[in-house]
Amino acid sequence: MAFIADDAPDAAQALKDEIETKVATLPAHSRLYKTSRRVSGLREFVVQRHYVVLYRETPELVEIVVIVHARRQWPPK
């Protein structure tokens, strides 16, 4: 968010708000999003076409593993 905020503070805030809104639904609906093709055992969803949120679910919690730009190679090879 800090990188985006340097040039576009409103865009950074909008992205942060959208991520937080979608993440807030995960405890009640952790299987709402598709299983990841990138990493076994994770699920993922896209935010604003350019950011991918990858997370894992356990019986106790939903853990956000990483948020990456869609152009970034993740996991690293």
Image (cartoon, grey):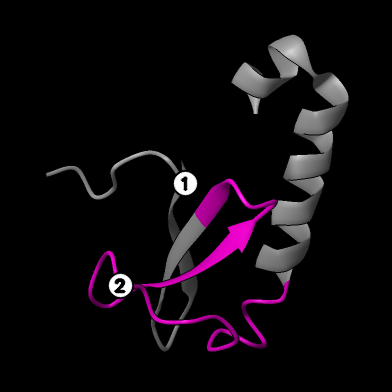
Residue under pointer 1: 70
Kind of residue at disc 1: Ala
Kind of residue at disc 2: Arg
Disc 1 secondary structure class: loop
Identify the mark at residue 14; answer none if there is no mark: none
Image: 6 above or below 55: above
Residue 16 position in % (x across, y down): 74, 42
Residue under pointer 2: 37
Q: Which residues are magenta?
A: 25-52
* Membership of 29 in magenta stretch: yes
The rendered magenta stretch, by its main secondary structure, is classed as loop
Crowd class of label 2 (few under 14; some 14 to 19; many from 20; radius 10 Å): few
Q: Quadrant of the N terminus?
A: top right
> 67 or 70: nearer the eye?
70
* Membership of 23 in magenta stretch: no
Disc 2 secondary structure class: loop
Residue 67 position in % (x across, y down): 48, 48
- Mark 1 and mark 2 in contact (Cβ < 8 Å)? no
